[in-house]
Image (spheres, grey):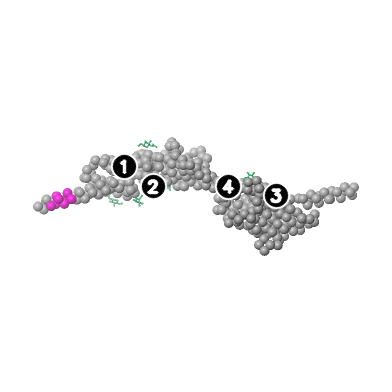
Amino acid sequence: MTFAFLCAILLSVRLLASAQNIQIQPLPPTVNYGENDLVIVCSITNPSQLAAVYFIELQRNSSTLFDGVVSVVTGQTSPIQWKDFALRNRASATASIDSPSSAQLRLTIDKANVQCPSDFKMYKCRMSGFSSIASESVSQETSPIIISYIVKPAVIEVPRVKILNELYVTPDRQFPVGTAITLTCRGQTIRWCAQKTNEMMFTGLPQTPIHSEASLSGCQYTRSSTITYNLTSQDTFTKFLCESGDTGLCGTGTAIQYVNISTTVTEGSSTTSAPSTDEESSTINSPTTNDTSENNDTLTTDGTSASGTIAGGATVLVLLILLVV
Ligand SMILES: *[C@@H]1O[C@H](CO)[C@@H](O)[C@H](O)[C@H]1NC(C)=O
Ligand SMILES: *[C@@H]1O[C@H](CO)[C@@H](O)[C@H](O)[C@H]1NC(C)=O
Ligand SMILES: *[C@@H]1O[C@H](CO)[C@@H](O)[C@H](O)[C@H]1NC(C)=O
Ligand SMILES: *[C@@H]1O[C@H](CO)[C@@H](O)[C@H](O)[C@H]1NC(C)=O
Ligand SMILES: *[C@@H]1O[C@H](CO)[C@@H](O)[C@H](O)[C@H]1NC(C)=O
């Protein structure tokens, strides 16, 4: 009876001595890439069973092996010792090892420095100390954990506008009817929608976008998407959007960007579209080209109209001379 009782005590002591003394915690449990720091804490779970903690180390796996990242060692002048020097340049560590109850090692990778996916590896903590129950040294390690993460769809840039076949992006947002423009946006999966001034809502554009090669930025592939759109007389004021993320209706994506395009008043377009107009009509035309917003497209017509006014002025002069005579 007493023997059995003793056995039970001994057994429980052995169990207690082999109880887990070290734990690993990722904070937060799931890292929102780009928004959360990546923090991993190694800490002591049963400090009352330990007389001392000598050493705590955080490891992570590369291929099949685990390598030390950073450790804290008692009795050193600089207790924190880095082993992963590349990580040391973009992470920080704090530690305490003085008493078992407060002993811990904390690695922090600032959200701006987290590398995806290479930082989301398997991590584990190791410790060694002296057990006050078994009166012997203990060395333990945690099971490895995988740091889980989520990535939100990339923020899409504001659509870039170009006149078809021109080399450079234009800041202009107003074009003559008949202009073919291209709109380009960068993101994960891109959908294009438009809303004309008389329309109640955005509807998907039928154009098939031209996509660039996808390239990995962070943990997600992004690519650019380009559509060509012919501005019609219906496009007095048309809003375009590009969006990313799984969407049902237009405008429900997780990342959306807009651009507003309008057409210039069509009054003068009939005269400018006729290239055979003589000097008189071009002089009449020049005061009405008061809209200075798209000077760069009409450089040549501007030039002819300018020469038209000079020629017109000359004829007026000749007439005056004739009158004087
Ligand atoms: C190490 O991590 C990789 C992922 O980066 C995983 O595929 C592999 O199974 C891990 N190896 C071990 C031994 O944990
Ligand atoms: C725009 O107009 C041109 C001809 O002017 C035509 O070839 C092209 O298919 C049109 N594009 C779209 C998207 O309607
Ligand atoms: C586009 O026009 C709307 C008004 O319809 C305005 O609220 C919005 O700010 C404009 N967006 C841009 C990018 O100019
Ligand atoms: C050009 O526009 C200005 C105002 O922006 C106006 O005062 C002027 O009369 C216009 N000129 C012509 C020729 O329409
Ligand atoms: C027009 O073109 C000139 C260069 O030829 C450039 O410096 C200027 O920014 C352009 N203006 C607009 C509104 O595109």
Q: Residue furthest right?
A: 1
Residue placed under numbered mark 4 in the picture? 117
Instruction: Give the distance between the C-alpha atoms of the residues marked 3 and 2, in whole angstroms.
Output: 57 Å
Cβ atoms at labels 1 and 3 below 8 Å apart: no
- Label 3, residues with CA under 10 Å away: few <14, some 14-19, many ≥20: some
N-terminal of the pair, mark 4 or mark 3, is 4
In-image side of 265 versus 188 (left or right) = left
Residue type at numbered disc 3: Thr
The residue labelled by disc 2 is 168
Task: Assess disc 4: are there few (<14), some (14-19) or many (≥20) residues with their C-alpha within 10 Å of its C-alpha.
Answer: few
Q: CA distance from mark 4 to mark 3?
A: 23 Å
Circle 4: element type: loop
Q: CA distance from mark 1 to mark 3?
A: 74 Å
- Can residue 53 be seen here? The reply is yes
Identity of the residue drawn at 58% across and 55% down: 90
Count neighbours of disc 2 (C-alpha within 10 A) and say few if under 14, some if 14 to 19, many if 20 or more: few
Q: Residue at x 66, y 48 (%)?
A: 65
Please name the residue that numbered disc 3 is placed on. Answer: 142
